[in-house]
Amino acid sequence: MTIRAVIFDLDGVLTSTDRFHTEAWQATCENWGIPFSVSSSDKLRGVSRKESALIILREAGLSLSEEEFERFSDEKNRLFVTLLDSMGEGNVLPGVKALLRELKPRYRLAVASSSRNAVKILKRTGLMPFFEVIVDGTMIRCSKPDPEVFQKAADALGIPYDECLVVEDSIAGVSAAFKLGCPVAGVGSASVASGVTYSLAETKELGDIL
Ligand code: BG6
Ligand code: MG
């Protein structure tokens, strides 16, 4: 297998912002009196804000009017963005900066995230300069498990899909990458997803492989 590019997911792979998503949903649900279990928050990894809201409501057996649904999702995003305001370089996951420094001269690097806040996160954490291509939630029509975000990143790099290693912490993202024929490094809860090329407890372990 030849790997010429590495396409990273963002939340939970490069930065610890995955827990801000959970915290923001938890607080929003508390406000709305909607049950939310942190233990099922893995299901929200990688999927869009709208799809996350739908999953939460489905699990609670509830439905909201269109207008309420908008308010519910907007409230979560406002809380999430407030949490981002306190964020900085300290929110880069351990060993990730050293890994990116090591990989940059040898591989083409991209970020492919479902988040519409990805650029803000990359700027605040100082990770922006490592990446040649960034595809985020504002640039796609279908979110993971649809492969669109990875396809756009690989196409922008001009590298064949089977030569792009995708690094993902979500099951939705792993499925998306498989659909495209990319090798996958599953991180954390996605490390046990069946068929992953590499299983990593933490992103920094990629340095031992590449
Ligand atoms: C993904 C997260 O990166 O972005 C999901 O893993 C989140 O949990 C999604 O729902 C969308 O994020 P945002 O910032 O556009 O609400
Ligand atoms: Mg993620």
Image (cartoon, rainbow, N blue to C red):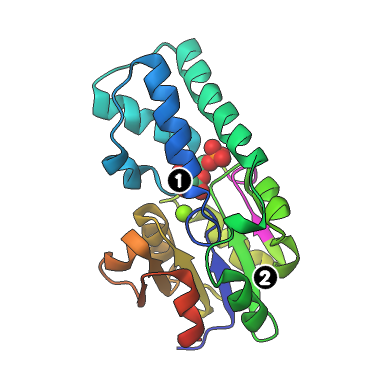
Question: In terms of image quadrants, where is residue 32?
Answer: top left
**Range shown magenta:** 134-140
| Residue occupying the point 62% across, 77% down | 98
Name the secondary structure under disc 1: helix
Q: Mark 1 points at which residue?
A: 19
Instruction: Tell me: residue 124, above or below residue 61.
Output: below
Category of crowding for the residue at label 1, using alpha-carbon neighbours closer than 10 angstroms: few (below 14), some (14–19), many (at least 20) = some
Q: Is residue 142 visible?
A: no
Instruction: Tell me: residue 19, above or below residue 153.
Output: above
Residue 209, image x, y percentages: 45, 86
Sooner in the amino-acid sequence: mark 1 or mark 2: 1
Which quadrant would the N terminus be assigned to in this image?
Answer: bottom left
Residue 159: assigned label: none
- Determine if the magenta segment contains residue 132: no
Q: What kind of residue is marked 2? A: Leu
| Residue occupying the point 39% across, 55% down | 170
Disc 1 to disc 2: CB gap under 8 Å: no
- From the viewer's perspective, tell me whether residue 60 is left or right of residue 105: left
